[in-house]
Each structure stands twice: as structure tokens, then as C-alpha cells.
Amino acid sequence: MLTVAEKVRGAMSDLHRAERAVARILLADYPVAGLQTVAKLAAQAGVSGPTVLRLTERLGFGSYSAFQQSLRDELQQRMQSPLDQYDLVTTSDDALGRAERTFAQVISRTFALLDPKEFEQAVDLLVSPRRRIFATGGRFTSLIARSLTLHLEILRPGVQFLGVEDRTSMLTDFTSRDVLFVADLRRYQASTITFGTEAARRGVHLILLTDRWLSPLASEAEVVLQVALDAPSPFDSLVGASAAVEALLGGVVDKLGDAPKQRMKDYDTAWRARDFPEPGRAGEQEEDGDEQK
């Protein structure tokens, strides 16, 4: 079932001007804006009450109360914990096959959620040589942000992962040329939202990787990339998020062409010069258990 936000985006091109004004307000402060009264939402959008009702009807809701109930249901899904989902998991005697089917669906749903225009905008920001690229995330989503920076720093300069301890000091150094990639998935992390919001208000170009229910940070983001979270366990899957990052890296390589080759060569040379294992060969050890001095 589509979320209200997905329905709004899908209908946007067919809406009348006044209806689009309401739709933009809904998406800018989602889902809070839609939980207001008809009169308050209409006033915020600068339209009449009947215009708001026409929009909700276009979206397939029989009444404004049905529209708001859908938003409230989404809010509940937004905050579902692994414990909440534990009894909802479908079990079987074929865990491997179930995982294969689930992850195939996750990939398909993720690419259906990703907006091509927003994706291209994200790639353009990531390849711009005049911009510094930073990435951060929460308790689990830091893995996604770190994956992006580990690969991107091989392709271009000016890339940095920001741990929680780096955020406060970085706020004072951000400029309007900088790009901040934030991964924030359900149940969302308050400290990550606060940091991303403050960075955006300082003029940073914010790319948000989130889910179909949308992190509260979506209202501050310049680019929003949505991914599916379906999993064969009670824990939301990072497979969709990983696929989105891999797709971004593919887009970056397409735009950069052969330009990164010398940097990649220098990168490998630098690793060898410092007696580190070559990238991709980290498992090799000294023979006979000798330690490197």
C-alpha cells in the first residue's frame, strides 16, 4: 500500500495549481501538516478549505478523517521496533529461500521508490569537484554512510565520514559548498536529525537516505532518496540502503569517466608504501605468524 507522501508525489503533475500548493505544504512538513484541521492546512497553503478536500479526494480518500487516519497509521509504522515486528515475521523451514525472496523484493521495491531526478541530483552533488563531501548516520545507518565514504574517497578528494564525536566541531566549519549525506531509517535518531537540520540551515546541501515513511529530516533535505526495509527477521534490512549507495557509486563512476584512475593507482601505492595490505587483500598475513614490525 502506498503512503500518503507517495500518493501525493504520484499525483503532483495532474494537480491544479491550488492543489499543488497544498501538496507542497504536506510534503514540506510531512506528516505533521496533514494532521492539522482543514482550515489550518488551507490557511498555510493560501487556499480554500474545499481545495484541501478536493486534494484528499484526488488521493483516493473518502473523507478528510480517512486521510488523517492513514497518516496516523503511518506514524505508528514509523516507530515500530524489532520487538513490535517480532510476531509479524513469517517463519518457514526454508530460511535461506525466504531470505532470497525477501531481498529480491527489497531490491525491486527500493528502485521503484528511488526518484530518478532526485537520484541524478544526488550524483551531481557527489561528483562536483568544488564541493567537500561528508557523510553520517545513526547507530546502524552509520554503516551505510561509512560504506559510501570508503568507496567515494578512492574516486575523488574531499570526502570524510563524520562520527558522532565529529559533528559538533564540524558545524562551525561547514560552508554552502559542502554536501552532507545522512542515512536515517526507522526509528530515526534524534541526534542525527538535529545535526542534519542545523547543517541544512547553515546552507549545506543535504542528501537524505531514508525509508518510505520519511525521516523528520526530509523537510530539510535538498535530495531525498527512499529505500525499502523489508527483512526476513524482525530487524529492518539494510539491503535496500546498500543497493542505493552502490547505485550512487555507479552513477559517480559514470560521470567521472577515466578521471579517477590515477587517483586509484596512487591510493593503492600509498597503501603498499605504508605496509598496509592492498585494498581487497586485507586477509593476507605474514607467513609463520610473524607480526609486522
Image (tube, grey):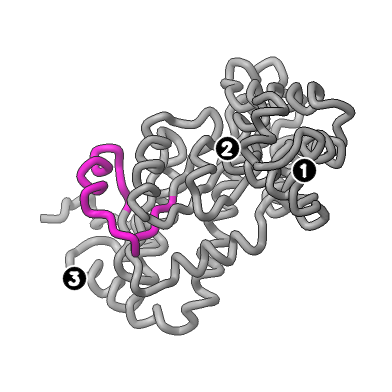
- Quadrant location of residue 251? bottom right
Marks 3 and 2 close (CB-CB < 8 Å): no
Marks 3 and 1 close (CB-CB < 8 Å): no
Marked residue nearer the N-terminal end (1 or 2): 1
Place of residue 190 in the rendered image (x, y in percent of width and height, measured from the top left): 41, 29
The alpha-carbon separation of the residues under discs 1 and 2 comes to 15 Å
In the displayed structure, does residue 182 sit left or right of residue 26?
left
Marked residue nearer the N-terminal end (3 or 1): 1
User: Image point 41% across, 33% down: which residue?
Assistant: 139
Residue matched to label 3: 273
In the rendered image, residue 82 lying in the magenta stretch gets the answer no
Q: Nearer the viewer, mark 3 or mark 2?
A: 2
Classify 10 Å Cα crowding around label 2: few (below 14), some (14-19), many (20 and above).
some
User: Image point 34% across, 82% down: which residue?
Assistant: 262
Q: Is residue 219 above or below residue 16?
A: above
Residue matched to label 1: 7
Q: Nearer the viewer, residue 206 or 241?
A: 206
Q: The N terminus appears in which quarter of the rendering?
A: top right
Q: Is residue 11 above or below residue 80?
A: below
Q: Nearer the viewer, mark 1 or mark 2?
A: 2
- The magenta stretch is 161-181
Mark 2, secondary structure of its residue:
loop
Tell me if residue 42 can be seen. yes
Place of residue 157 in the rendered image (x, y in percent of width and height, measured from the top left): 31, 69
Q: Nearer the viewer, residue 217 or 61?
A: 61
